[in-house]
Image: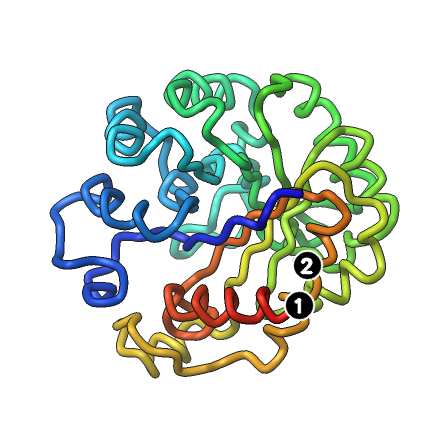
């Protein structure tokens, strides 16, 4: 029975000096040297915004030991159904790269040195209204052709921000396709332990939990974007810890990624969460 892994969503934060780091560093890769002494996994969020380059991948790997693992997001060039509107635009522009096998192959080529060190490669979808995606059926149909081109050694995971997709049909598709579900604790989404209570029996293999939080602007105002104290301790974190304990007991491999926006300081949330896990 594997213990859950807990790490942070991104890791290059100067305000973590004293919590995680002894001092500031110039690059994200340099921060990993001290980060990896404290945590065993990290989420690479930046690749959502741009395709990774091989040198960055090598730099990351050089600064962690062989037992350290990552989760990462696929670029939004692959997961966006439509381009984001520019100022003055009124019509949606379809994204020709949506679920593109060519772009996915480009990603795999750049990230190849990290193959085997990834707990999850996540397709993060924005909320899809009916203009972007008519139905859950259409969403699953779009994914079916994409997942057939995903090599078996790539641990694909999907994060949907459509609560109306979280039904048995969706979880059946994930299980049959050997895709992990990303439980996203986020504003406008149902609590992840409620989703797990309904559909946890349909999980197998592994899963990712992302504790993202509520109103980003509000918590950024409270913290001043200095992420070294808890400003919004979540009362239901105990329920998430109980959920994780149950998943582990059932043999599900769990990776927990925690965002600063969840409570105000991801490192302090990890400490708090760790104590709760041990209580059980």
Name above or below for residue 41 compared with residue 221.
above
Residue 61 position, x and y percent, is 31, 29
Sequence-wise, the earlier of marks 1 and 2 is 2
Name above or below for residue 149 compared with residue 262.
above
Q: Nearer the viewer, residue 77 or 74?
A: 74
Looking at the image, is mark 1 or mark 2 nearer the viewer? 1
Q: Nearer the viewer, residue 262 or 36?
A: 36
| Marks 1/2: CA–CA distance | 7 Å
Q: Residue at x 82, y 30 (%)?
A: 176
Q: Nearer the viewer, residue 151 or 163?
A: 151
Q: Residue at x 41, y 55 (%)?
A: 8
Can you say which quadrant of the picture contains the N terminus? top right
| SS at circle 1 | loop
Name above or below for residue 178 compared with residue 250.
above
Answer few, some or many: residues within 10 Å of disc 1's Cα (few below 14, many 20 plus, some between 14 and 19): few
210 relative to 193 in the view: left or right: left
Residue 236 position, x and y percent, is 63, 77
107 relative to 179 in the view: left or right: left
Q: Residue at x 68, y 45 (%)?
A: 181
Give the residue pinned by disc 2.
245
Q: Nearer the viewer, residue 90 or 56?
A: 56
Q: Residue at x 57, y 71 (%)?
A: 276
Can you say which quadrant of the picture contains the C terminus? bottom right
| SS at circle 2 | helix
Count of picture labels: 2
Residue 258 position, x and y percent, is 47, 59
Q: Are marks 1 and 2 in contact (CB under 8 Å)?
A: yes
Answer few, some or many: residues within 10 Å of disc 2's Cα (few below 14, many 20 plus, some between 14 and 19): some
Give the residue pinned by disc 1.
280
Label placed on residue 243: none
Corner quadrant of residue 166 = bottom right
Residue 73 position, x and y percent, is 48, 40
């Amino acid at each position: 029975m594997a213990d859950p892994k807990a790490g942070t969503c991104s890791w290059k934060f100067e305000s973590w000096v004293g919590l995680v780091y002894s001092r500031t560093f110039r690059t994200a890769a340099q921060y990993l040297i001290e980060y990896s002494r404290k945590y065993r996994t990290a989420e690479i969020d930046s690749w959502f915004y741009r395709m990774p380059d091989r040198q960055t991948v090598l730099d990351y790997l050089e600064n962690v030991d062989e037992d350290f693992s990552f989760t990462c997001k696929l670029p939004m060039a692959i997961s966006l159904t439509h381009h984001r509107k520019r100022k003055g635009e009124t019509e949606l522009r379809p994204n020709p790269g949506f679920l593109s096998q060519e772009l996915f192959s480009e990603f795999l080529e750049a990230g190849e040195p990290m193959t085997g060190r990834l707990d999850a490669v996540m397709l993060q979808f924005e909320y899809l209204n009916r203009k972007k995606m008519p139905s859950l059926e259409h969403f699953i149909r779009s994914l079916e052709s994409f997942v057939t081109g995903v090599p078996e050694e790539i641990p694909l995971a999907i994060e949907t921000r459509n609560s109306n997709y979280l039904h048995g049909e969706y979880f059946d598709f994930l299980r049959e396709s050997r895709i992990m579900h990303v439980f996203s604790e986020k504003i406008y989404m149902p609590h992840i332990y409620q989703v797990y209570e309904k559909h946890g029996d349909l999980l197998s293999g592994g899963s990712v939990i992302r504790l993202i939080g509520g109103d980003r602007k509000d918590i950024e105002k409270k913290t001043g974007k200095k992420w070294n104290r808890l400003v919004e301790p979540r009362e239901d974190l105990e329920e998430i810890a109980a959920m994780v304990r149950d998943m582990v007991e059932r043999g599900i491999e769990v990776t927990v990624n925690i965002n600063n926006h969840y409570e105000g300081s991801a490192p302090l949330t990890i400490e708090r969460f760790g104590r709760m896990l041990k209580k059980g």
